[in-house]
Amino acid sequence: MEALQAALLDGNHKAAVIEARRLLTEGLPREALVTEGLAPAMRCLDAKCTIRSFNLLEIMLVGRAVTGVVHELYPDGDPPGTGLATLVIASLEGDVHDLGKNIVKMVLIGRGYRVIDCGKDCPVDVLVETAVREKAAGVLISGLISSIIPRVRQVRPALTAAGFAHVPILVGGAALKQCSASDLNVDAVAETAFDGAHAVDAWFGSPS
Ligand code: B12
């Protein structure tokens, strides 16, 4: 497991996938690779994100390696989760930034949540339809460019119109974390992926 974590943190995509395959061949369950391999690596990455001299290329390479391992573990799509709440996540239409979204997704999968990823450049309608179809307990939005703010404000009314007024909305990302939750018409704004995970835990209860 340490070799997997080291390969992830090195941003070594090929080595990380090889280590994941080796661990699976040795009989470790996929969920163990998520909670004991990916999640600790994500915690280290989060620590690096908070220091002033963080290296963006390094973060992008780690993100790519994590994505590669998740594809290896769950080639047919989104991981099933371990019985905790289902969450839907997206970067909204007009925003192609998805590195932060992918990190949040991995952190939450690592904590046992079922996370449905609507991808980047996602229309509000698609996000809401997915939340309804998947009976989501929460909706998560990543926003990196300021022009996305009006769309974020549309999500609550769209959820309400679909009969999902009760579902809390959590947002993060460089553009959104400069705003207040009330200004964005959401329930919470997270500074980092791990702040967001703590908010989700407070709402839905992680076993960790
Ligand atoms: C990498 C990058 C790109 C890449 C994106 C690659 C990708 N696949 O994501 C590329 C090159 C494609 C790109 C394109 C553009 N970019 Co750009 N980009 C960046 C850059 C340098 C880093 C963003 C990043 O990935 N950071 C690393 C990740 C890990 O950090 P993060 O997203 O903040 O996520 C962390 C937290 O915020 C949190 N988080 C994030 N989302 C969420 C969601 C939830 C629910 C939670 C709980 C937490 C959470 O978790 C993460 C880990 O803690 C930023 C500069 C910056 N300082 O942010 C500009 C930046 C975001 N880009 C910018 C711009 C303007 C653009 C372009 C319009 C450029 C252009 N003229 O074409 C286009 C956008 C096109 C579009 N329609 O979206 C501006 C936005 C300005 C603004 N306020 O509107 C920025 C701020 C640069 C700048 N200073 O001008 N970009």
Image (cartoon, rainbow, N blue to C red):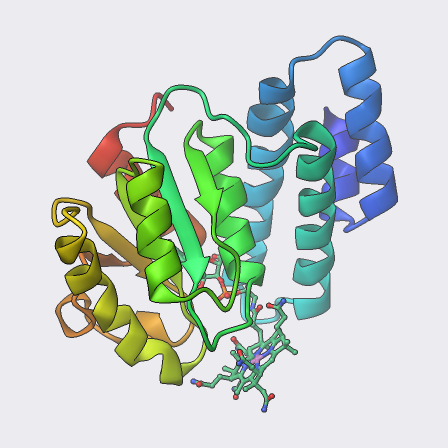
Q: Nearer the viewer, residue 88 or 192?
A: 88
Answer with the quarter of the image where residue 183 lies: bottom left
Residue extending furthest toward the top: 27
Which residue is rendered at x = 81% and y = 46% of the image?
Answer: 13
Residue 51 in sight here: yes
Find residue 194 and report its horizontal and vertical position in percent: 41, 47
Q: Is residue 192 visible?
A: no
88 over 38 or under it: above or below: below
Residue 158 relative to residue 107: left or right: left
> What residue lies at 26% left-to-right and 38% top-to-bottom?
137
> Residue 38's x, y, as percent?
62, 35
Q: Is residue 73 left or right of residue 52?
A: right
Does 179 sit left or right of 116 as displayed?
A: left
Is 194 in front, or is 81? 81
Identify whether 107 is placed above or below 90: above
Residue located 54% across and 51% down the image: 103
Residue beneath the point at 22% across and 71% down: 153
Quadrant of the snapshot with the N terminus: top right
Give the quadrant of residue 199.
top left
Which image quarter: residue 143? bottom left
Give the mark count: 0
Q: Residue 79: image x %, image y %?
A: 55, 30
Image position, residue 193 (x, y; %): 43, 52
On-image quarter of the C terminus: top left
Q: Is residue 196 left or right of residue 188?
A: right
